[in-house]
Image: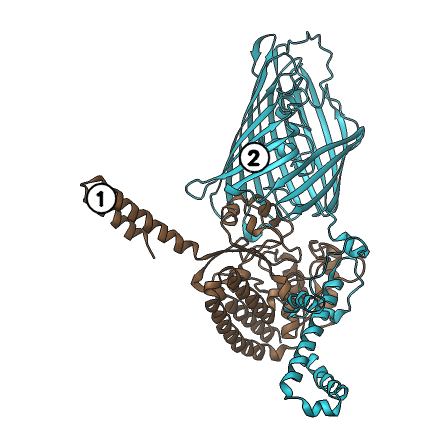
Chain colours: A cyan, B brown
Amino acid sequence: MRLLFLPAIAGLLSFLVPPAARAQAPDNAELLNRMKAMEDRIQALEAEIQALKSQPGAAPAAPEAAQPPNAATAQAQAPAAAVAQGGAQLPVYGGANAAASKVFNPDISAIGDFIGSAGNPANRYTPALEMHESELGFQAIIDPYARGDFFLSFGEHGVDLEEGYITFTSLPGAFQLRAGKMRAAFGVVNTLHNHVLPWVDRPLVNQDLVAGEDGIDDAGLSLSRIIPAPGQIFLEGTAQVFRGDTEGVFRADRRRDLSTVEHLRAYRDISESTNLSLGGSFARGHSPFVNAENQLYGIDATLRWKPLRRAIYRSFVGRSEFIWARLAQNGPTTTPFGYYVSGDYQFGRRWFLGGRFDRSQRALCQATAPLTTTPTACVPGNLGPLIQDTGGSMVLTYWPSEFSQVRGQLKRTHYGEGLEANEFLLQFIFSLGAHGAHPF
Amino acid sequence: MTNAYETQAAVRGVLKLGGSMFKRLQALSVIFLMIGAGSAHAASKLNVVTATEDLAALSREVGGDHINVDSIAKGYQDPHFVEPKPSFLLKLQKADLLVVVGLQLEIGWLPPLQTQSRNSKIQVGANGYLDASQFCKILEIPTGQITRAMGDVHPLGNPHYWLDPENGRHIAKGLADKFSELQPADASYFQQRYADFDKRLAAAEKGWEAKMAPFRGRKIVTYHRSWPNFCDRFGLNVVDYVEPRPGIPPTPSHTLEVINTMKRENIKLIFVEPYFDLRTPNSIASAVGGDVVQIMPSVGGVKEITNYFQLFDYDINLIANAFNKVK
């Protein structure tokens, strides 16, 4: 197509050049050079048009306006041509058109989490129908050195910054630094947002010992590093320091009451389809009950199976976490322990079936999340005797598409106060916009 | 190049030396120099990680033994759904160059890997990040308003563009230029290999086109929208899809529509990628007296496809045989 222009351009040029000048022309080489330059210029302009058309929000492209094979070359030529024409161009601030102004907008997403509950909740009440959470996400690359992520959580009673942090991606020595408010790297469930959990609720051990849904989620700094290890083992160490406020677990009355979290994770592919991840966690912070230190210890294991050829139809995730707490009080330290074991099997492209067994001790006067509503006579600074909660759940999940899911959970719990809860939870999760993928 | 055997031999030599401390230090410095030389040579090879096997195959064509190449996705897995496993981080951490398909094909799994890789060279916009789609002819760029009601649409166009050999040629050229930029000392080697690839591809294209010529204009149904570039190049006409919308599994009503369309238009072949379930395509094929062809969208889809040429050899043979069978 472009070659058809060339004779016409050549004719035009020869017409514009006076006869005398034509006679003086040294040879055709210069003319050919100029034609070549004009062709390059046309290509550059075409590439610019294509680039503008391909921008979201730009005018619809004609069907045949697909990017030409040599667009990259042409695009590369465009700035050179611009510089050749007018020298170095100054940056233009403001005045950009609407489409250009959206280019640097962050990825914006909204995720709705609706929960309906039926049956007897015993002493941990949750509403019958609840728009449990609406999560707004804003994620973007900040500059060549960092990216930023914000997750605002709208509950029925207010707004909370669930996470908001900057991640420095270009530090030397294989380090990664994160600063802001974030979910602590304690175990697995504590790091997960509601919409990526394989259940409607969180395990009893998290409800009783690790502040439930909010978990250890605090303002602080996180430094992590991939540690060289033999045998194709992925080893990552993370050290975090937080302000020290986690409802019912840590409280910072003074600036020095910082809490810290350390996590070591080892991962290995057992085969192409199967992998195993093991983790160890430690957290410490100032007790909310007395002027002393609380500590949490955790180990976690996750076994995953996903045959690559049938990855969209079949998978299994088995997971378990064991958590020990050392909670200071007036008198001897109390040491509750809890764990869960779960398995989730994908048996169709859109279908998942799972089960979970929970067991957790807690001190009778210890705050749980959701709150335990049994009236108990508690003395401040005294957590009371240890009691044990035990529960089991069956979960069925259906994904109408990648962007929505419906989940039913049948749950039976025996609470340490001697109460039985039998509940059915129904959950709808729906996602709008561009929500970035979560880490593995 | 210093290999492990030579290093061990040097170590044994040192042990035999015994004697003065000076001699030991001298020998140790020789070992360090040798190890240094070995690692310097290793460092002289570009470490390239690609999102898919196809990009890895094209990288091998151009980079030869002057690069190390690893692919994240396997050729027989759905490239839309790859688990961002930490083991990939070990590869990405050492990469000099990350080559991606782009057009949001990897949006569900690659960004967290890049962020966690701790490798500034391969972050978006850095010199070691290459989006291969910029070199290619992209089809099915949506026009007008796009919503998720259309399924899992790619707003920047169809990302299965490597299935036109002409695009393969452009990707290879882009790779040769990028390798040359990152490793100028080997630029002539990379350009020479590209020229050779270009020549071999041109010859192969003639054979593929001749083989597909009898079937130009034939209508087919495909499972997913993986084949627009392939069909555009080889003159096949995709009339319908087994998926009612991209990424949405087949529904009974849509399956019935596909059967009616195939009967009405006398379509006999359904192309299915290796990672999709064959039950619905098989039932459609049996209802219309047709056949299902499990063709490979990527290098490594089956064992015998180990390079970019074999991908087209395999698929075109399969398609030609299938058309001849159903007439």
Could you say which quadrant of the image residue A70 lies in? bottom right
The picture places residue A222, in percent across and down from the top left corner, at: 59, 33
Q: Quadrant of the C terminus of chain A?
A: top right
**Circle 1 sits in a helix, a strand or a loop, which is it?**
helix
Query: Which residue is under mark 1?
Result: B23
Q: Nearer the viewer, residue B303 or A154?
A: A154
Could you say which quadrant of the image residue A258 lies in? top right
* Residue B306 in view: no
| In this view, the mark in front (1 or 2) | 1
Q: Chain of mark 2?
A: A
Residue density around tag 2, few if under 14, some if 14–19, many if 20 or more, within 10 Å: some
Q: Chain of mark 1?
A: B
Q: Nearer the viewer, residue A307 or B269?
A: A307
The picture places residue B255, in percent across and down from the top left corner, at: 72, 59
Residue at 70 percent of width and 68 percent of height: A47
Query: Which residue is under mark 2?
Result: A223
> In the image, is A82 to the left or to the right of A322?
right
